[in-house]
Amino acid sequence: MASTGIATKGSAAGRRGRRRGWLRQAPEALTAGALAPETLTSAPPADEVPDARLQGHWLLASMGKRVLRPGGLHLTREMLEAAAPHAGDRIVEFGPGVGLTAAELLAARPAFYVGIEPNTEGRAKLDAVLSGRPARVVTAEASASGLDAGSADLVVGEAMLTMSSPQQRRAIVAEAARVLAAGGRYAIHELALADTAPDPDRRTGRGEVSREISRTIKVGATPVKLAVWRALLTDAGFDVVWQGTAPMRLLEPSRLIADEGPIGFARFATNMIRRPEARRRVLAMRNSFRAHKADLSAVAMVAVKRPTQH
C-alpha cells in the first residue's frame, strides 16, 4: 500500500503568482441559492443549457477543463502504474469521457479496449483517441455494461462512484467484478471523506459535506471515508492491493496548471473572463472545496478480484 501526494513542477508557483488574479473572490458566488442536485445521467449539450444550470463537470468541460479527476492527472498516473496495464490486457473503462485516461491505457498496447459511456457529449474527442486502435465504445451504464462475464483483465473507473447513490455504487462495483476474470484488477479514483468528518447517512450516503458540495456542483456527490471505499471493494469480492491519496485541489491555480498545462490554463482563464455566470459558479465550487479541505481528499485504489468470485 502506498500513500501519495500531488507534485507540481517548480515553474507552476511562478505562473500561479502571475495568473491568479482571474480567481479573485466574487461576492455573488452561488452557494446557498443553488438548485437541488440533479442525477448524473445523460449530458445536455452545453450550448443548450445556461451556465447557471449546468452540472459542475459539464460546466468545467465546456470551459476547456480536460482533467476532472479529484486527485488530478498525477494521481491517475500513479493509479495506472499500480494497476500495471500491459500488452495483451483486455481493458474496460467505465466513463471514459473525452479519452484522457483511455490514451494512457492504449499506450500499453492492450488486446482490446472497451469504453462504457452512457453520454454522447464529448464522444468525438473520445473517438479520435480510439481511432485506429483495437478499441470501441459501448453506449451503456456502468452498472449494466452488457459485456461478457470474465471478459476483462483490467477495469478502470474514475470520478464515477462518488457521483452515484450507495445502491448505484454497489451495482457498478458488482458489474466490475462480474466483467473481470479471476485475478483481474479494478482501479478507481474517487473523492474521500477524512476520518474526522461527520459520518453521512447510511441509507442516502449524504452528510453535511456532501449536501454542501452537491448544491454547489448541482450533482449528487457522496464521498465516503477510506475504510468505506475499501469495504465496498472487499464486500464485492476484491482485495485492495494499493491505495494512494492526494489533496482535493481540483480548482486551485497550481493544480489547473499541472493538469491542463499553460495553454489549457490560459484557455480556461479566458473563458472565466468571457462567461461571468460560469466564473461565479467556478468560484462557488472552489470556495466549497476550500471550506471543506480538512474533510476531503482524493483517493485511488487498485483491487484484485479473488479467484472464488464468479
Image (tube, rainbow, N blue to C red):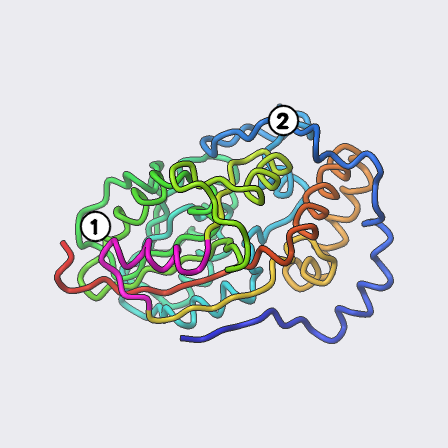
- Horizontal side of 26 relative to 238 (left or right) equals right
Q: For mark 1, what is the residue?
A: 178
Q: Which residues are magenta?
A: 225-240
| 3D distance between C-alphas at marks 2 and 1 | 37 Å
- Which type of secondary structure does the marked residue at label 2 adopt? loop
Query: In the rendered structure, which amino acid carries the disc numbered 1?
Result: Arg
| Magenta stretch: includes residue 235 | yes
Say the numbered circle drawn on residue 289: none
Q: Which residue is mark 2?
A: 35
SS for dot 1: helix
Instruction: Return the residue nearer the eye: 65 or 299.
Output: 299
* First of labels 2, 1 by sequence position: 2
Q: Is residue 309 left or right of residue 98?
A: left
Q: Residue at x 67, y 29 (%)?
A: 34
**Residue 274, percent across and down?**
81, 37
The answer to which of 203 and 86 lies nearer the viewer is 203
Query: Residue 270's spot in the image, x, y percent?
Result: 79, 45
Residue at screen point 49% across, 73% down: 3
Residue 284 image position (x, y, % from top left): 72, 41
